[in-house]
Amino acid sequence: MSGIMDEVTFRQIPVNGIELRAAVAGEGPLVIMVHGFPESWYSWRHQIGPVAAAGYTVAAIDVRGYGGSAKPEPVEAYSLEQITADVAGVADALGGGKAILMGHDWGAPIVWNTALLYPEKIRAVAGLSVPYLPQGEFAFIDVVRKAFTERGRFFYQVYFQDEGVAEAELEADVRGALRRFYYAISGDAPDGTWPVDKPHGATVLDRLPDPDPFPAWLTDADIDYYTAEFEHSGFRGPLNRYRNHYRDHAYLRPHAATPIGQPSLFIGGTRDLVLKMLPGADMLAMMKPNLTDLRGAHLLDGIGHWTQQEAPDEVNSLLLDWLAGLDRKV
């Protein structure tokens, strides 16, 4: 872990009425990296150095609610309206109002929608794990309630809706919770490790194993870092992101017919359960018409949800090739 800590400088960046912490490295055009749940800037530790070495200023941020960033209390402070404005603010503060975006997990919808809402600021956008899907007729939370909850089946985002419940479960043993959650949706976990038959009313960690040893892509030192971050920050802010489906739907629905026109890239894994989240839906096929300059949609064989951590070399190669193309065409 000491290697990445030597490569970055931490900065507190005033944006949108709060401060975000960013791990910054390199010089050149700005690349903002946005993490997902439950992670931090540190999830990009394998990408920061190579992208900086390719001639970019890299800013891997802690999303509000995480790590060294501000942690406002209200649920509504974690809407996509607010968080996309945060990212646009980092583009202003560090990139002169211009940036290239990379996002994973929740970071992917954050960067997709920042590109949609701030096209004058965002030069290009890459999403990992979660394809871009515009807001449909119904809020996502209602779609999954119909598909899962009404059929008596557990769905983690429904479980996350009640304030304090998931926080208590995850904070009771942060290290164990992270290990179990990370492993269950990784490419190393056998089919069924994330149970698809849990009943509504179960908890998120129910029946998730704690592997020993943990797969090599996440070291003990990595787990130590994540654990310390969440023991300090708690999970309220991260979970509040899931409690804004109705606000996000209302805010973004007017933009549903507007495609993302910037050069884009998608990277996922063949064993990522996100791509199988909606029964019967081909999420990649649904994505492609909404990205008018998509320059690649890659699925990495055997890779699960933690795309850039599980397959850093493959992801770095794809990202660097994409960035090289942008230099010529943007």
Image: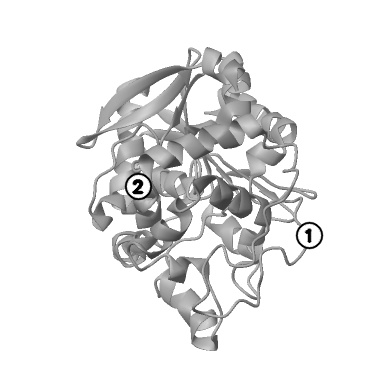
Q: Which amino acid does label 1 sit on?
A: Pro
**Residue 153: % across, % down:** 56, 80
The residue depicted at 61 percent of the width and 60 percent of the height is 274
Mark number, residue 111: none
Q: Is residue 77 above or below residue 25?
A: below
**Would residue 29 be visible to someone looking at this image?**
no
The residue depicted at 58 percent of the width and 67 percent of the height is 206
User: 218 or 130: nearer the eye?
Assistant: 218
User: Quick one: which residue is furthest to the left in this view?
Assistant: 17
Q: Marks 2 and 1: which is nearer the front?
A: 1
Q: Which amino acid does label 2 sit on?
A: Leu
The image quadrant that residue 310 belongs to is top right
The residue depicted at 38 percent of the width and 65 percent of the height is 165
Please report whichever mark, 2 or 1, sits nearer to the chain's N-terminal start: 2
**Residue 148: % across, % down:** 54, 80
Circle 2 SS class: helix
Residue pointed to by mark 1: 190
**Would residue 205 be visible to someone looking at this image?**
yes
**Residue 65: % across, % down:** 34, 43
User: 286 or 19: nearer the eye?
Assistant: 19
Q: In this view, does 21 lie above or below 143?
A: above
Residue pointed to by mark 2: 117
